[in-house]
């Protein structure tokens, strides 16, 4: 892997993308075998892995829009890498198609006989029905893809022309994009995750999923930046100051995730309404799920909190690398904890949990790397680029 220091494009992109594609194809092929062996288990594993990678793609979209709306300087050198994750959403839209086949295996509300004997499901039927579910999914992906492509198109155009109006255009796109992002991610969370147990509801659930999504994109962005540094790419461009800020954001949103998780639990515990408390009961009454619940609590909050609490830790690349990998693992465990209790009352790990993860992830990372190799690694004509390179924490 070699970088052209004049254009900031990779002369030779290495084998990362090719290996990711091969692993992705193998993972999806093995997962397809799992579908024929146990379709219901396959769909639960696939949904967990799919949402994991979707949260990274839309997390990238959020990061890019936030960058433009705040006119940030420090993150300019990271913007293109985040944009390359943002534009993987069309691939994820295609990878959503297998879930259409699994609607009846995943969602109790999709069974007409179940709705006929359940008054609550009858009341929710105008919203929770298969045609409207698919229409909403198309709207979510349409909005994410539309704003991702428009922002990416302007960003790439900036590489070939020094035009300050392009920055203003991306900022104008980001304003309505941010509002639509909040709505679409919230309702996608309701549809794909919360409606797995259609009797349960939490108005804060969308924020809960968002907090995990932002942590995931920060973690994988940190890992990619460190990977480049280890290969002597952008070593003088993405400096320790930028890693420090990434560490601060991961620390901040670890606390934010814990605050939202506790707020959701506390309000449900305090209200003590059976329709709400049953969701936590399913994740506590069996010993195996109780252990996973404690792993989510300590692994998603206590461990990364202690790991990143000091300034020195946020400037230590080894610590950031290990913590980023840990946060991604805990993000997956968190989604597993949300999805799989709807499959069984005790924990049953499956090899399909792994194959679906590497299958979808391999395809996503291949597309990410394809975009990374096709254009400059940083927005070379951004007027704040030099200020970003020279950025220092106070």
Image (cartoon, rainbow, N blue to C red):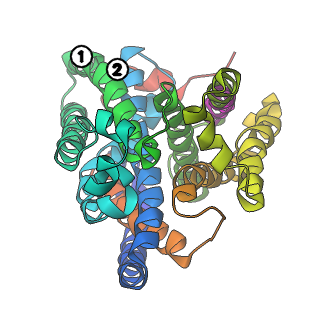
Q: Position of residue 329 (x, y in %)?
A: 63, 55
Position of the C terminus by quadrant? top right
Say whether disc 2 or disc 1 marks the residue closer to the N-terminus: 1
Residue at the spot x=18%, y=29% of the render?
161
Q: Badges 2 and 1: C-beta atoms under 8 Å apart?
A: yes
Q: 109 or 72: nearer the eye? A: 109
Q: Of the numbered discs in the image, which one, if any, rests on residue 280?
A: none
Q: Is residue 308 left or right of residue 1?
A: right
Residue at the spot x=49%, y=25% of the render?
388
Dot 2 falls on a residue whose secondary structure is loop
Q: Which residues are magenta?
A: 243-258
Question: What residue would you read off at disc 2?
Answer: 383
On screen, residue 21 above or below 103: below
Q: 70 or 9: nearer the eye? A: 70
Furthest residue in direction front, as rendered: 117
Question: What residue would you read off at disc 1?
Answer: 164
User: Is residue 198 found inside the magenta-colored segment of the image?
Assistant: no
Q: Position of residue 309 (x, y in %)?
A: 80, 31
Question: CA–CA distance between discs 2 and 1?
Answer: 7 Å
Q: 127 or 35: nearer the eye? A: 127
On screen, residue 237 above or below 371: above
User: Is residue 257 found inside the magenta-colored segment of the image?
Assistant: yes
Residue at the spot x=70%, y=47% of the render?
296
Q: Is residue 30 left or right of residue 299?
A: left
Q: Position of residue 171 (x, y in %)?
A: 28, 17
**Crowd around label 1: few <14 · some 14–19 · many ≥20 (10 Å):** few
On screen, residue 181 above or below 25: above
Q: Main secondary structure of the magenta part?
A: helix
Which quadrant would residue 126 be assigned to in this image?
A: top left
Q: Is residue 63 left or right of residue 226?
A: left
Q: 274 or 178: nearer the eye? A: 274
């Amino acid at each position: 892997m070699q970088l052209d220091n004049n254009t900031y494009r990779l002369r030779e992109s290495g084998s990362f993308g090719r290996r990711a594609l091969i692993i992705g194809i193998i993972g999806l092929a093995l997962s397809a075998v799992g579908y024929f062996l146990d379709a219901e288990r396959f769909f639960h594993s696939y949904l967990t892995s799919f949402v994991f990678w979707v949260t990274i793609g839309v997390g990238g979209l959020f990061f890019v829009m936030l960058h433009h709306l705040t006119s940030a300087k420090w993150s300019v050198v990271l913007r293109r890498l985040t944009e390359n994750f943002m534009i993987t959403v069309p691939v994820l839209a295609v990878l959503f198609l297998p879930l259409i086949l699994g609607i009846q295996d995943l969602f109790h509300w999709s069974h007409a006989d179940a709705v006929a004997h359940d008054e609550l499901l009858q009341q929710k039927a105008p919203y929770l029905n298969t045609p409207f579910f698919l229409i909403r999914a198309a709207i979510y992906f349409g909005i994410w893809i539309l704003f991702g492509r428009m922002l990416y198109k302007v960003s790439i155009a900036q590489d070939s022309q020094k035009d300050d109006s392009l920055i203003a255009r991306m900022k104008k796109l980001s304003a309505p994009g941010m509002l639509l992002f909040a709505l679409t991610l919230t309702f996608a969370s309701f549809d794909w995750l919360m409606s797995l147990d259609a009797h349960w509801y939490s108005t804060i659930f969308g924020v809960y999923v968002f907090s995990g999504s932002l942590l995931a994109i920060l973690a994988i962005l940190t890992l990619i930046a460190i990977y480049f540094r280890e290969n002597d790419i952008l070593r003088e461009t993405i400096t320790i100051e930028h890693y420090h800020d990434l560490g601060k954001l991961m620390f901040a949103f670890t606390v934010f995730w814990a605050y939202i998780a506790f707020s959701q639990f506390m309000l449900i515990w305090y209200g003590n309404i059976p329709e709400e408390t049953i969701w936590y009961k399913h994740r506590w009454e069996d010993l195996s799920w109780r252990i996973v619940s404690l792993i989510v609590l300590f692994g998603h909050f206590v461990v990364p909190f202690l790991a990143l609490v000091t300034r020195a830790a946020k400037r230590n690349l080894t610590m950031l690398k290990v913590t980023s990998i840990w946060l991604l693992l805990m993000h997956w465990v968190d989604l597993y904890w949300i999805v799989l209790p709807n499959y069984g009352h005790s924990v049953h790990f499956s090899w399909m949990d792994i194959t679906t993860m590497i299958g979808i992830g391999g395809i996503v990372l291949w597309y990410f790397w394809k975009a990374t190799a096709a254009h400059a690694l940083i927005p070379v004509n951004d007027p704040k680029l030099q200020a970003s390179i020279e950025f220092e924490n106070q």
